[in-house]
Amino acid sequence: MSSDEVAHGATSYAFKPSLAGAARRFDLTEAGLAWQVGARRGLWPYAAIAAVQLSYRPVSMQPRQFRADIVGGDGQRQVVLSTSWKGFALVETQDEAYRRFILELHRRIAAAGDRAAFHGGMRPIPYALAAGVLGLVAMVMAALVARALATDAWAGALFLLALGAVFVWQIGGFMRRNKPCRYTADALPPQLLP
């Protein structure tokens, strides 16, 4: 944060969501959340922010990415990511700056009256559907391991167990972090912050 930002009470956060996309900048000013996406600009007073949804959204180039969807009173949505594209094959994490920005945004929304809805993780219906599919996959994998052991196919059973362990490590972590929840501006879900 520059000395000019400190003097005006602003906290800033900037990132580039994709290689070809426009950079995004967000400033927490005394008047509200000022945002700029390419040439588009806007200012939302904190009391006019309708909702904030935090989630964990890993992608192929960055397996550890956090996301905040901020919804204005007019229904317009701004997305804030914890990573930024820096080059053709380089995506940089900005964990500390993202965390500071999100915590300060919540503090300012609360100070303005805290009428916003705060949600964490996935929406309940898609989460339940994903959990159901994962349960079916687990049952099929268990049946395949049992069949491999019954036929003395030890290599096949070990392969399936290793595949299952990797699957649980990757998908299980995603599901654990994105379990649907409601939270308050002063008690953010720690699993959805870097």
Image (spheres, helix red, strand yellow):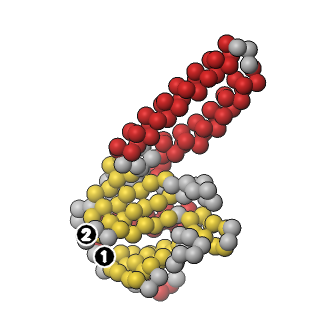
Judging depth in this view, the residue of 139 and 170 nearest the camera is 139
Residue density around tag 2, few if under 14, some if 14–19, many if 20 or more, within 10 Å: some
Circles 1 and 2, Cβ within 8 Å, touching? The answer is yes
Judging depth in this view, the residue of 74 and 150 nearest the camera is 150
Q: Position of residue 42 (x, y in %)?
A: 35, 81
Q: Position of residue 191 (x, y in %)?
A: 48, 48
Assign a secondary structure to mark 1.
Answer: strand
Residue 22 is left or right of residue 33, and the answer is right
Question: In which quarter of the view is residue 20 placed?
Answer: bottom right
Relative height, residue 86 to residue 115 (above, below): below
Relative height, residue 147 to residue 77 (above, below): above
Q: Nearer the viewer, mark 1 or mark 2?
A: 2
- Amino acid under disc 1: Trp
Look at mark 2 in the image and give the residue it sits on.
73
Question: In which quarter of the view is residue 79 placed?
Answer: bottom left
Judging depth in this view, the residue of 36 and 118 nearest the camera is 36
Q: Earlier in the sequence, mark 1 or mark 2?
A: 1
Residue at horizontal 67 percent and vertical 29 percent from the top: 160
Residue 34 is left or right of residue 175, and the answer is left
Look at mark 1 in the image and give the residue it sits on.
44
Q: How many marks?
A: 2
Relative height, residue 84 to residue 139 (above, below): below
Determine which of the numbered discs, if any, sits on residue 153 in the image. none
